[in-house]
Image (cartoon, rainbow, N blue to C red):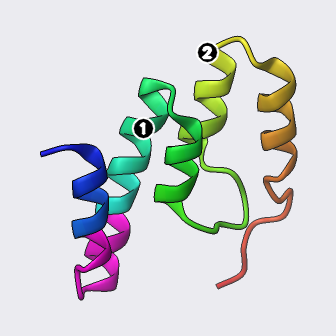
Amino acid sequence: MQLREAEKLALSIPNWEQRLKSLDWVGRIYARAGYLEDAKRAFGKQAAVPYAIWTARLVSGDLPGALRDIATIPSEPMQW
């Protein structure tokens, strides 16, 4: 199964928690492989850039991009 297929199947999972775990898994694989735009799509809209994306930028040598992503992380803990 290809990652794009796994991503599409994950979107159809009715259980919200399981769907997020599956999309997180797909996003991490995309990021590790260097497909950052696909990883962003898989992670969806989040308040801050996920760890997997900014670390992939850092490892690939995109320091300005990684610093820009890190700047989106809120400095205050989230209130639930």
The vertical placement of 64 against 77, above or below, is above
Residue for badge 1: 30
The percent coordinates of residue 13 (x first, y second) are: 23, 79
Q: Residue at x 38, y 69 (%)?
A: 20
Q: Main secondary structure of the magenta part?
A: helix
Residue for badge 2: 59
26 left or right of 51 in image: left
Q: CA distance from mark 1 to mark 2?
A: 14 Å
Q: Are marks 1 and 2 in contact (CB under 8 Å)?
A: no
Q: Amino acid at mark 2?
A: Val
Q: Amino acid at mark 1?
A: Tyr
**Label 2 residue SS:** helix
Q: Residue at x 63, y 68 (%)?
A: 45
48 left or right of 76 in image: left
Dot placed on the residue nearer the N-terminal end, 1 or 2: 1
Q: Magenta segment: does it hold 11?
A: yes
Q: Magenta segment: does it hold 14?
A: yes
The percent coordinates of residue 75 (x first, y second) are: 86, 56
Q: Residue at x 53, y 38 (%)?
A: 52
44 left or right of 71 in image: left
66 left or right of 45 in image: right
The percent coordinates of residue 39 (x first, y second) are: 50, 46
Residue 41 - label: none
Q: Residue at x 66, y 35 (%)?
A: 54
Q: Quadrant of the N terminus?
A: top left
Range drawn in magenta: 10-21
Q: Nearer the viewer, mark 1 or mark 2?
A: 1
**Label 1 residue SS:** helix
Q: Residue 76 or 26: which is nearer the viewer?
A: 26
